[in-house]
Structures are given as structure tokens and as C-alpha cells.
Image: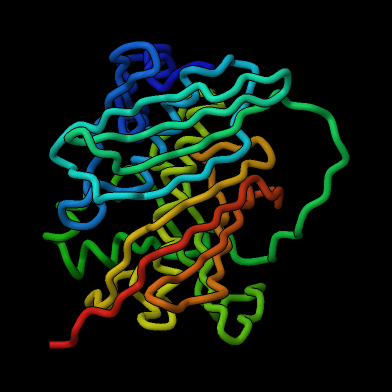
Amino acid sequence: MTGVNDAMADQNPEKSSIAEFVELLRIEDLDENLFRGTCHAGAPMRAFGGQVAAQALTAAGRTIPRERLVHSLHGYFLRPGDPTRPIVYQVDRVRDGSSYATRRVTALQRGEAIFTLSASFKKPEAATERQRTMPPVPGPEDLADPFVAWERSAPEDFARATIFRSMEMRFIPADAPGMPRELPGVPQQFVWLRTGTPLPDDPLLQVCALTYLSDLTLASTTALHLQPHMVQRTEPNRVLLASLDHAMWFHRPFRADEWLLFAQRSPSASDGRGLAMGEFYDRDGHLVASAVQETLVRERPRA
């Protein structure tokens, strides 16, 4: 399957904006089954988990024939990644079957594993389909850009958070028309997401980009009962969050550079952990992917 770097090489070098989000997924070949990348910070001095997972999946995809597409991934965050140091991705070619192939990736820093990923790939096949219906919520064009308000209220923080300049987000208010009724004990949030710049026509790159985007708001969904507006940053962050594990399933083709609705719910929080589940729908209502994440959730001591 075409790698991220190969896809970038096919683009017009004058269209530098196209490479902006793609740069977040870039890794370099070191040797057979060995790759290296760098990741920006998510929390202070912690590499952003979505980028680590996306680069690990990119490394796995580099060892898979083009006709096989990734359909699932399961990752565990073992140690905080250091955003000031490179990350080495070591790929184990676990199995190559007639229909399915499995890869295991270990992300290393200073000789220690910080993240592990298992990914499964398969050949597409025809089959009967069904899916949950997408709720009739407002489209992204009807919603405010949260980054405008954030930049106005905290310009220094926003200037440092270059992560947000490479994507677009639109949060749907809880009382918006078409929003599903929130069940007791199950906080939810719905947000439209897409990359901020166009992406090449590479199925692996599209999936890796969505893997990155999927880690932006799932963790906060587990803490909405403690701080309802933490993602929009309308109040100081008083909750400590850290991803423990992350799983995704890719159901149908999609483009991560086009608007996708991320419908998220958190059915449980206990023992300093929260669980969040999410579904991605495209503008035509197709359910294209699902995600599940367990998150460390701790309240910061009040001043």
C-alpha cells in the first residue's frame, strides 16, 4: 500500500498547503520493518496519542500489499511519549493469510515501549450491509468555529497549539434540533471533524488521518460529568485526562478531509477510568468507522 511519503511525492510541490496535515503522519524508513517519526505535544511534555497511533498504523501499512485495507486497530498507551525526541516504530509481521493480514507495532523511545498497536488488514469483498441511522443533527456549516473563540480568549495558548491549525471542528450544542436524547448517566457530545487541508487519494493515509482525529475528543467525553465545556475551553481545565487504550473499526470507505460527524457517548466512569464510544458518519449518513477508548480521569485539586 502506498506510504504517506510516497503520496506526498505525487503532489504538486507548489501546493504546500496540502502537505500540512500529511506532515503529521510522516515517518521515515530506517530498515526493513523499522521506521522513525516525531510527534507534537498533546498535553504539556506528552506526545499526542492520536499522532503516535496514526504513525504506528502508517508503519504497519507500509508492510502490507496495496490491495489489503486496514479494518481494525487496537492500541495501548504504556508510557508518556516525549515530544522532543524521535519515536522508533518496529513492525512485527505476525501473519499473512489468504484474506487477512495482521501486524503488531511497538513504538520505542530510549529503548522502552511507549505504545503498542495491533492492526488487521483484509481484501475487500461483497456482502449484505446494514447500519445504525445517523441522527438528523445540524451540519457543520450551521455551527460556529470554536477555535475563533478560543483564540480570542487565550491567544497565547492558541498560538502554541499548532495542532489546531491543521484541522477543523464544529461542536453541536446539546439542545440543537435532531440531537438524540441523552440517557441518564451517559454523557454525550457530537462534533464534526475533518483535516484542515486536502489529502491525497490514498486509503491508508485517509485511515491514518481519521485515527489521529479520533483521539481529539473521546477522552473529554468521559469527563463531561465533571466539566461539561472542557473541550471548548470555556473554563479552566480542572480534570486530568490520559488515554489508556484506543480501538477502531473501519466499516466503509471515507475521506478524512471531508466533514465527518463523530457521535460520542460515555456509558461508564469509575475507579479513575472512563469509557467512551464513538461513531463516524459521512455527510451522506454512511457509518464509516467506530472507536472506543478507555481514559484515565482524575480531578485536579481545587486551589
Q: Position of residue 69 (x, y in %)?
A: 62, 27
Q: Is residue 2 left or right of residue 150?
A: right
Q: Is residue 122 left or right of residue 295?
A: right
Q: Examine the rendered structure and indicate whether residue 34 appears above or below residue 268.
A: above
Q: Position of residue 291 (x, y in %)?
A: 56, 53
Q: Quadrant of residue 52?
A: top left
Q: Position of residue 245 (x, y in %)?
A: 44, 54
Q: Examine the rendered structure and indicate whether residue 113 appears above or below residue 229.
A: above
Residue at 40% x, 80% y: name it. Answer: 228
Q: Quadrant of the C terminus?
A: bottom left
Please tell me which residue lies in front, 127 or 93: 93
Q: Quadrant of the N terminus?
A: top right
Q: Examine the rendered structure and indicate whether residue 301 appears above or below residue 285.
A: below
Residue at 58% x, 28% y: name it. Answer: 102
Residue at 50% x, 16% y: name it. Answer: 2
Q: Quadrant of residue 274?
A: bottom left
Q: Is residue 160 left or right of residue 20?
A: left
Q: Is residue 145 left or right of residue 71?
A: left
Q: Position of residue 96 (x, y in %)?
A: 62, 19
Please tell me which residue lies in front, 168 or 77: 77
Q: Quadrant of residue 170?
A: bottom left
Q: Examine the rendered structure and indicate whether residue 26 appears above or below residue 10.
A: below
Colour mode of the rendering: rainbow
